[in-house]
Image (cartoon, helix red, strand yellow):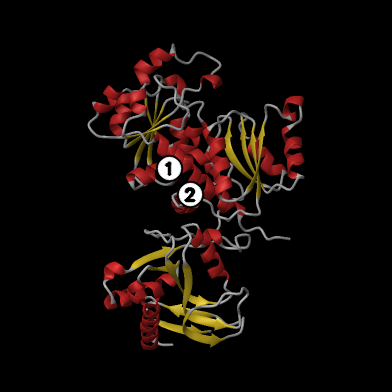
């Protein structure tokens, strides 16, 4: 997936989210730290051009302390920044790659520490199908790919990696 | 990401990078403590025993709260009212507790080196919560965290540690930590309470005039006069100590700049700090206590990891 395809996909995802949540009425967007933020940043930029930017409520969620693999490996915690209440709101969670589903499990857990949302939806740039270890499915998918466990999916971002593309390794 | 040590016995064993990892992790935990749900499931399957052979209010409550916020299971042990009073040795007590499958030990003891002794004999991770006159590493870390939070930096920060340096484990941890992160350190107080070796041992400034120390520093960390550890007369009276070395509001207001006042507690009001100084806007004593929970969460979290279930 090259830079142009990536940008079209992110535009499409943004429109799909808006389609279901006109003007983001009662809806908030939350990106998952660290790499989901690159997707959510771009989607929020896109959405802000389509509706009044003041209507967009955007937060970032770090799930380090909620992971189920703490015994295996410690991760560096990132910043969590949710400057609004999610009580009774619709939450669109955004991440780059959906693989085993464990990150999203932890994210759901982390989210509940901030209140009880009315509904949580999941928006994913790359969905690695048939590799789930938990019953979690995305609501918005950028691209679905079939991959085997030994393969890696890497998303590169301009701000961080100098180039913008998705590679299956 | 991993600390270079398995236990937290003292600041002495930490590298600068360890200290930075702990302080940065604590920052994230401080944020967790401001959420509606102040609890994370990180240490869900970890059991921690709090072993307190010496009296404590802040440290014990702070550790206990930190453990509960991390969802760990905790057991509290205080020497008074236990079999230690019947003559059971430290090692026996701990081995008995460990045979009940405990993963971490938080320990305070009046003998310097007690946690180091334990670390040699038992497999659990040990966190020193103060040992005699040696070290009190989590206090050092939370002091540094509070200084960084208040002033925005540690490197180049001028910190004066004032009072009973000789009997203070807080001073030992503070000095070593601050030197490791590049702060400038001065100790001040009566000559009888400042060990002679300290200037050379740690490469720090020594000052016997409290006003000069306050004029020099950005942050003053004022220590408690530890009467319980002094078995000889080191100054004539508390009243006289207060007049010569205590910090009064008048002294504070007469300085050319506004400095930050810290104290690890418990305060002897009217001895090392006057009441109106302890309660003034420049004092961050209560923030220190608040930060203590976040810092201890970070230490527990970082020392709990890396162990596979078997």
User: Which residue in the protein does label 1 denote?
Assistant: B144
Is the residue A17 above or below the residue B26 in the image?
A: below
Look at the image and tell me in which quarter the N terminus of chain A lies.
Answer: bottom left
Number of marks drawn? 2
**What chain is tagged by disc 1?**
B
Q: Residue at x 48, y 26 (%)?
A: B195
- Badge 1 marks a residue whose secondary structure is helix
**What chain is tagged by disc 2?**
B
Residue B238 % position (x, y): 43, 14
Q: In the depicted view, which residue is nearer to us: B203 or B168? A: B168
Q: Residue at x 36, y 23 (%)?
A: B275
Per the rendering, the mark at residue A31 is none
Q: In the depicted view, which residue is nearer to us: B9 or B78? A: B78
Residue A130 in sight: yes
Is the residue A46 above or below the residue B169 in the image?
A: below
Instruction: Give the mark nearer the N terminus: 2 vs 1.
Output: 2
Side of B11 relative to B188 (left or right): right
Q: How crowded is mark 2: few (under 14 residues within 10 Å), some or many (20 or more)?
A: many
Measure how far apart labels 2 and 1 are at the Cα level. Answer: 9 Å
- Badge 2 marks a residue whose secondary structure is helix
Residue B84 % position (x, y): 73, 29
Q: In which quarter of the image is residue A39?
A: bottom left
User: Which residue in the protein does label 2 denote?
Assistant: B19
Mark 2 vs 1: CB contact within 8 A: yes
Residue B130 % position (x, y): 57, 35
Side of B248 relative to A102 (left or right): left
Residue B280 % position (x, y): 32, 30
């Amino acid at each position: 997936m090259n830079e142009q395809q990536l940008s079209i996909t992110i535009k499409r995802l943004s429109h799909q989210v808006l389609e279901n949540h006109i003007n983001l009425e009662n809806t908030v967007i939350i990106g998952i730290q660290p790499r989901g933020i690159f997707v959510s940043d771009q989607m929020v930029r896109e959405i802000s051009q389509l509706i009044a930017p003041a209507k967009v409520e955007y937060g970032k969620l770090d799930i380090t302390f909620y992971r189920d693999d703490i015994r295996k490996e410690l991760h560096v915690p990132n910043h969590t920044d949710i400057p609004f209440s999610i009580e009774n709101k619709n939450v669109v969670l955004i991440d780059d790659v959906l693989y085993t589903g464990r990150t999203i499990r932890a994210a759901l857990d982390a989210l509940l520490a901030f209140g009880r949302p009315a509904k949580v939806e999941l928006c994913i740039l790359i969905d690695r199908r048939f590799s789930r270890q938990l019953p979690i499915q995305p609501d918005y998918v950028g691209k679905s790919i079939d991959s085997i466990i030994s393969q890696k999916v890497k998303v590169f971002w301009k701000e961080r990696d100098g180039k913008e593309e998705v590679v299956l390794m | 990401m991993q600390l270079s040590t398995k236990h937290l016995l003292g600041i002495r064993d930490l590298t600068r990078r360890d200290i930075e990892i702990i302080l940065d992790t604590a920052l994230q935990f401080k944020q967790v403590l401001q959420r509606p749900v102040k609890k994370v499931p990180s240490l869900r399957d970890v059991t921690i025993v709090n072993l307190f052979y010496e009296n404590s209010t802040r440290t014990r409550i702070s550790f206990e709260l930190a453990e509960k916020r991390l969802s760990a299971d905790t057991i509290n042990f205080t020497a008074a009212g236990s079999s230690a009073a019947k003559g059971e040795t430290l090692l026996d007590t701990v081995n008995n507790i460990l045979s009940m499958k405990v993963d971490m030990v938080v320990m305070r003891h009046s003998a310097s080196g007690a946690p180091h002794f334990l670390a040699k004999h038992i497999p659990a991770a040990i966190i020193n919560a103060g040992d005699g006159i040696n070290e009190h590493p989590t206090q050092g870390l939370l002091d540094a965290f509070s200084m960084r939070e208040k002033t925005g930096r540690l490197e180049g920060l001028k910190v004066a540690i004032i009072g009973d340096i000789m009997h203070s484990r807080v001073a030992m941890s503070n000095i070593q930590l601050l030197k490791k992160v590049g702060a400038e350190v001065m100790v001040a107080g009566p000559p009888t309470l400042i060990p002679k070796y300290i200037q050379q041992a740690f490469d720090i400034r020594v000052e016997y005039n409290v006003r000069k120390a306050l004029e020099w520093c950005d942050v003053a960390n004022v220590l408690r006069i530890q009467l319980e550890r002094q078995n000889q007369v080191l100054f004539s009276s508390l009243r006289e100590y207060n007049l010569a070395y205590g910090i009064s509001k008048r002294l504070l207001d007469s300085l050319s700049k506004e400095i930050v006042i810290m104290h690890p507690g418990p305060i002897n009001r009217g001895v090392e700090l006057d009441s109106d100084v302890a309660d003034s806007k420049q004092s961050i004593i209560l923030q220190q206590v608040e930060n203590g929970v976040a810092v201890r969460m970070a230490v527990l979290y970082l020392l709990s990891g890396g162990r596979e279930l078997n």
